Image (cartoon, rainbow, N blue to C red):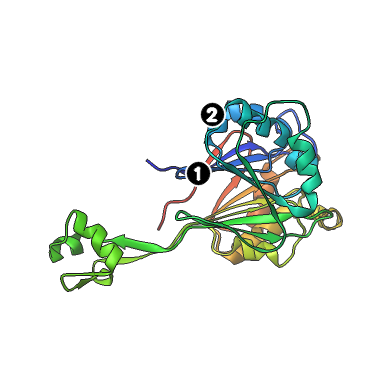
Amino acid sequence: MSVRELVVLGTASQVPTRHRNHNGYVLRWDREAILFDPGEGTQRQMLHAGVAAHDLTRICVTHFHGDHSLGLAGVLQRISLDRVPHPVTVHFPASGRHFFDRLRYATAYHEAADLRPEPVTADGVLAATPAFTLEARALSHPVDSYGYRLTEPDGRRMLPDKLAAAGITGPDIARLRREGTLNGVTLDEVSVPRRGQRFAFVMDTRLCDAVPALAEGCDLLVIESTFLDADASLAADHGHLTAGQAAAVARDAGVRHLVLTHFSQRYPDPAAFAEQARAAGYDGELTIAHDLIRVPVPRRT
């Protein structure tokens, strides 16, 4: 049975706390598992969360600040140590290639993995598979940073009562899907459009055009909210978002489930982030992330 869910490994910005590890997020999407922003301690958090190196098929790094990338060294070595048999593609800002290389070869080890670095040089599609298209957009941060968006192709949902009335069963259903018509029955007569699911991952950035573009129509949006609204000027100065700003983006983009994360250690009460998100008018499903939770991608409506 396919699983589509977000596994949260860490939620702290800049430094870990007693209750929050550095960043780390795994998106399980059917047979794929994409690791986003492996901060320090990610390998151990994977153990706690039940995520194995063998699960990982792709790694996406938004930028090369330590809280988003220092765990990359350990994860890459673990992929080799565990003899992961399939290729693992790694996306990261091209301007940080020297950081990637240093982390990849931070210590002596036997490299046995089939790692495939694919630096991101500009906005656009990074990968197109039957299950999804992965794209990136440049964000606004003191160092080069990219947000990522995953889009499932639109499809059709077959209607069992219509199929039965038309006398179409078994292998003929797949044939009708493939060919569009069968024995005078068209696909449109026995099915309805099924919108592909959408996921976006937006980390360190101030407000810019890429943020709403990445969030548009998402079923699940994971977005940083480092600061509370009272510190909006501080957020802008350091290239970050507030809880209210992130929620307003989600509200206007029609996001179904909003996950706020990447919290500054200056705020001891996470409930304040939820209060400000609701005050901004976001009325969809809301999660204030904490370490080791699992957030399912919303079921199709």
- Tell me, yes or no, whether the two marked residues, 2 and 1, touch with CB atoms within 8 Å: no
In this view, the residue in front, 54 or 204, is 54
In this view, the residue in front, 214 or 187, is 187
Q: In which quarter of the image is the N terminus?
A: top left
Q: Tell me residue 218's x, y (percent).
A: 54, 59
Residue 193 visible from this viewpoint:
yes
Labels 2 and 1: the sequence-earlier one:
1
Name the residue furthest bottom. Answer: 184
How far separated are the C-alphas under marks 2 and 1? Answer: 15 Å
Q: Quadrant of the C terminus?
A: bottom left
In this view, the residue in front, 168 or 101, is 101
Q: Is mark 1 on a helix, strand or loop?
A: strand
Please, what is the three-letter code of the amino acid marked with disc 2? Gly
Q: Dot 2, crowdedness within 10 Å: few (<14), some or many (≥20)? A: few
Establish if 163 lies above or below 26.
below
Establish if 205 lies above or below 5.
below
Q: Tell me residue 78's x, y (percent).
A: 64, 28
**Location of residue 221 by image quarter:** bottom right
In this view, the residue in front, 113 or 264, is 113
Q: Which mark is residue 32?
A: 1
State the residue at coordinates (78%, 32%): 106
State the residue at coordinates (57%, 28%): 83
Residue named by callout 2: 50
Q: Tell me residue 62's x, y (percent).
A: 71, 50
Q: What element carries label 2?
A: loop
State the residue at coordinates (71%, 36%): 72
- Closer to the observer: label 2 or label 1? 1
**Location of residue 12 by image quarter:** top right
State the residue at coordinates (76%, 26%): 108
